[in-house]
Image (cartoon, helix red, strand yellow):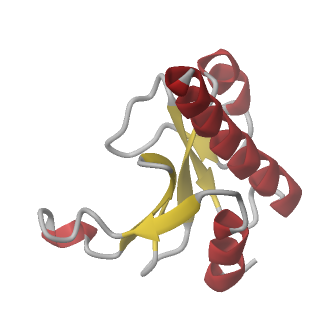
């Protein structure tokens, strides 16, 4: 999957949009693309490298997932709620899509609960 296919997949979920919020504040983060549901992030990628994505994750599953090659602690986000997933072939495309979907669902469900 290339960066455009990945981007299209992330934007295929309802009520999603993208932005690059960090560039104005951090010179090294100008190429970080963030995918949102509502106002909440569910996925981050570096457009220049496109080697990893950072995803929201159920804290109960994080330790098990990190046993997989290519799934690690995130850079600069809570290790309790986020994972970093390699996009270089260490993790299957099916698992990547499943993890992105679950990340979206986790964030969307959190928004729905708060709005009730």
Q: Who's the residue at 36% across and 38% down the image?
A: 77
Q: Quadrant of residue 28?
A: bottom left
Q: Measuring 87% from the left and 57% from the top, which residue is drawn there?
A: 94
Q: Is residue 77 left or right of residue 99?
A: left
- The answer to which image quadrant residue 32 occupies is bottom left
Nearer to me, 32 or 91: 32
Say which quadrant the N terminus sits in.
bottom right
Asked whether, in this view, residue 13 is left or right of residue 44, the answer is right
59 vs 110, nearest the viewer: 110
**Residue 8 percent location from the top left of the image:** 69, 76
Q: Which residue reaches farthest top?
A: 60
With 29 as the anchor, is 113 left or right in this view?
right
Where is residue 101? Give x, y as percent.
74, 48
Q: Can you name the residue that lies furthest to the front here? A: 116
Q: Is residue 50 above or below residue 93?
A: below
**Nearest the eye: 56 or 64:** 56
Vertical order, 80 against 87 (above or below): above
When the figure is inspected, residue 87 is found, relative to residue 112, above or below; the finding is below
Give left or right: position of 41 versus 67: left
**Residue 75 x/y as whole percent:** 38, 46
Residue 88 visible in rendering: no
Depth check, front residue: 112 or 18: 112
**Percent from the top left, x then y, of residue 59?**
59, 19
Question: Residue at point 60% right, 30% down?
Answer: 112
* Residue 62 appears in the picture as rendered: yes
């Amino acid at each position: 999957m290339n960066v455009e296919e990945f981007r299209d997949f992330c934007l295929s979920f309802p009520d999603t949009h993208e932005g690059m919020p960090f560039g104005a504040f951090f010179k090294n983060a100008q190429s970080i693309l963030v995918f949102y549901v509502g106002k909440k992030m569910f996925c981050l990628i570096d457009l220049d490298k496109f080697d990893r994505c950072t995803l929201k994750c159920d804290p109960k599953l994080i330790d098990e997932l990190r046993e997989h090659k290519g799934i690690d602690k995130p850079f600069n986000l809570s290790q309790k709620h986020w994972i970093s997933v390699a996009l270089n072939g260490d993790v299957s495309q099916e698992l990547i899509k499943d993890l992105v979907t679950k990340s979206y669902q986790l964030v969307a469900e959190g928004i729905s609960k708060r709005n009730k």
